[in-house]
Amino acid sequence: DYFYFVLDSLLKDGYIDGIKLIKAWGGDIINISGMQSITITSAGIHFLKENSTMRQTLEWLRDNAVSLPGMVTTILSLL
């Protein structure tokens, strides 16, 4: 159910294309057609590049010159 919700949201927001969500009476999604031809749109690519939490985390780590061994040492020292 959550997977269908996510796909429905991505499709409605224009981040993906090429699939059709098949809905039952009442609006519940019961199947997906076209998964083999799903594509990410330019808006979806832009969203991933500009709004990705992982990208923001990576940039924070780079900007703050934090190394993985340094993070592990810091975390272990707090335990």
Image: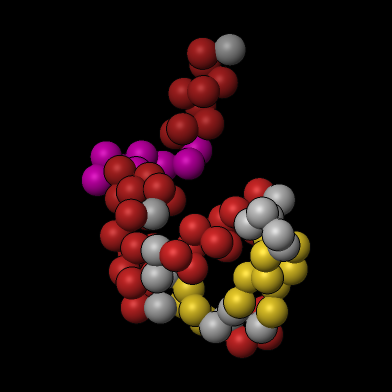
The span shown in magenta is 61-69
In magenta segment, residue 66: yes
Residue 70 vertical position relative to residue 49 in the rendered view, above or below:
above
Quarter of the view holding residue 7? bottom right
At a point 66% along the width and 49% down the height, the residue shown is 2
Front one among 19 and 57: 19
Farthest residue to the left: give it.
Answer: 63
In magenta segment, residue 68: yes
Count of marks placed on residues: 0
Farthest residue to the top: give it.
Answer: 79
Front one among 33 and 15: 33
Residue 37 shows in the view: yes
At a point 40% along the width and 48% down the height, the residue shown is 53
Residue 48 spot, x, y in % from top left: 39, 63
Residue 31 spot, x, y in % from top left: 74, 68
Quarter holding the C terminus?
top right
Quarter of the view holding residue 64? top left
Residue 42 spot, x, y in % from top left: 34, 78
Front one among 18 and 73: 18
Residue 62 shows in the view: no
Farthest residue to the front: give it.
Answer: 25
Residue 17 spot, x, y in % from top left: 49, 79
